[in-house]
Image: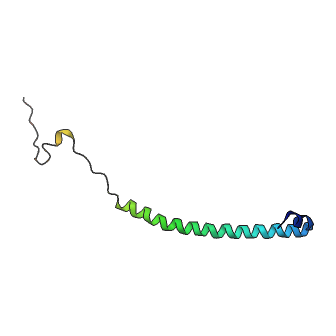
Amino acid sequence: MAKNDLDSLSIEELAALRENATDKLLEKVTARRAELEAELEKLSQYDRLAKKSQSAPVAKPRKGDEKHSDEAREPVAKAA
């Protein structure tokens, strides 16, 4: 719509045009938001799968325990 066309419209016609434009914009934004939310839902499934596949960290043995980890330990008696 050319600027001259807007100049020729009455206040009521301009108000109606504004209302129609606002309604159409809201409709398009709502539709796009639904598209994006659906895409985000699809992508979040991959995030859940990735989190499930990650295992808990494995504890590393301490330096002194490396040699004797398989042997049973017996308490050492104190000399009296």
In this rendering, position of residue 74 left or right of residue 37: left
Location of residue 48 by image quarter: bottom left
| Render colour scheme | rainbow
In this rendering, position of residue 4 left or right of residue 47: right
Quadrant (top left/top right/bottom left/bottom right) for the C terminus: top left
Tally of numbered discs: 0
Determine the residue positioned at 11% across, 40% down.
75
Q: Which of 75 and 73 is in front in this view?
A: 73
Determine the residue positioned at 15% across, 46% down.
69
Determine the residue positioned at 48% across, 65% down.
43
Location of residue 26 by image quarter: bottom right
Residue 11 image offset from top left, x and y in percent: 91, 66
Location of residue 33 by image quarter: bottom right
Q: Nearer the viewer, residue 74 or 54?
A: 54
What residue occupies the far left of the structure in this picture?
80
Residue 27 image offset from top left, x and y in percent: 70, 70
Determine the residue positioned at 75% across, 70% down.
23
Residue 9 image offset from top left, x and y in percent: 91, 68
What residue occupies the far top of the structure in this picture?
80
Q: Answer above or below: position of 77 versus 72.
A: above
Quadrant (top left/top right/bottom left/bottom right) for the N terminus: bottom right
Q: Nearer the viewer, residue 62 or 49?
A: 49
Residue 39 image offset from top left, x and y in percent: 53, 67
Q: Answer above or below: position of 14 versus 67.
A: below
